[in-house]
Structures are given as structure tokens and as C-alpha cells.
Image: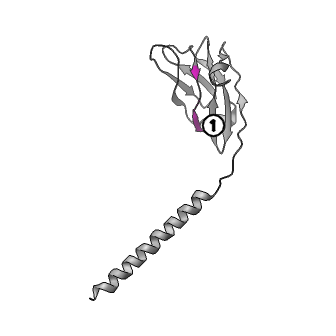
Amino acid sequence: MRQSPAIVMSVIALTFSLGGGAGYAASVATAKAPVTKITWHKLGLINKWHEVFATNGPPSYAISNGIVYLYGAMQGGTTGEFAVLPKAARPKNTLWIAVYNDDNSGGSAWLDVTPSGKMYINGPDDTILSSLAGVTFPAGA
């Protein structure tokens, strides 16, 4: 009999804590986050790389809240280096990021982004269509 009040109090406390959490979750779910507009800037392609519009647009970059976003597709360069990012969009360290490469043989390609802003596509068939879609990294400059 002496333990009954303790059990009842525990159940009441648990009920209130669960109810409070559910109320908080509901308030967060209905809150609307502000939409951030991102401004895209075309990359100046070099070394005979050219845009491939049919896939996903011209190679571009955007910066929002300290994150660099890349977009677009290109092909046909004479070397792996295809563009140079402006200072504000450069990473602090060299990055190696897997990217889509349409080489028809199941190969892969990767993007090198250097602190100097130079960007390279590397891989067995690196001059075949490569996509930058979905690539993001923190700006470090």
C-alpha cells in the first residue's frame, strides 16, 4: 500500500513529460522555416571544357550560409582542370569528391577542389560527361 502513491506519482510525471514532448514536436512541425534564395553563378570553363545543357544545366556554383553548392555538367576538356572558384567559394583544404561520370563502362570520376580554387575532374575517362550535381562543401576562405 505504501508504494501505491509513488507509482501513481511516477505515472503522472511520465504522462506530463510525454505530453509536453508531443506538444513541442507538434509546434516544431507546424513552424515554417524561411526560404533562403540561392544565387547561382556560372563557372568560367577552361581547357576546352564545355557545358552540357541537356543533362542538368551549365556548371555553376552558389554560396549560402557558408556552404558551397555546385551544379551542372560538362565534358570534353584537354586536361582535368576545368574551372577556378572565386576566393569566397574555396575550401580550406583539398577535397576529393566522387562525381557522376558517363563513361559507359562503369568507371568512376572524382572532383578535386583545391584551396587555390582550381577544380579538376579525374578518372579513367575524365573528359566524358561529368556532373557536379549534388556536390556541397564548406567554404573555408
Residue 31 screen position, x and y as percent? 63, 58
Which residue occupies 36% across, 81% down? 8
What quarter of the picture does the C terminus occupy? Answer: top right
Residue 68 screen position, x and y as percent? 63, 37
Specify start and end residues of the magenta stretch as a single range.
Answer: 130-140
Up-down: is 117 above or below 16?
A: above
Return the residue nearer the eye: 54 or 76: 54
Return the residue nearer the eye: 41 or 6: 6
Which residue occupies 58% across, 17% down? 129
Does dot 1 land on a helix, a strand or a loop? strand
Up-down: is 57 above or below 16?
A: above
Return the residue nearer the eye: 58 or 118: 58
Up-down: is 126 above or below 89?
A: above
Which residue occupies 73% across, 37% down? 39
Residue 111 screen position, x and y as percent? 55, 25
- Which residue is under mark 1? 68
What quarter of the picture does the N terminus occupy? Answer: bottom left
Q: Exactly how many numbered labels are in the figure? A: 1
Residue type marked 1: Val
Q: Is residue 51 magenta?
A: no
On the rendered structure, is 17 left or right of 31? left
Residue 134 screen position, x and y as percent? 57, 32
Up-down: is 36 above or below 103?
A: below
Q: Quadrant of residue 3?
A: bottom left
Callout 1: few (<14), some (14-19), or many (20+) C-alpha neighbours within 10 Å? some
Which residue occupies the extreme bottom position in the image?
A: 2
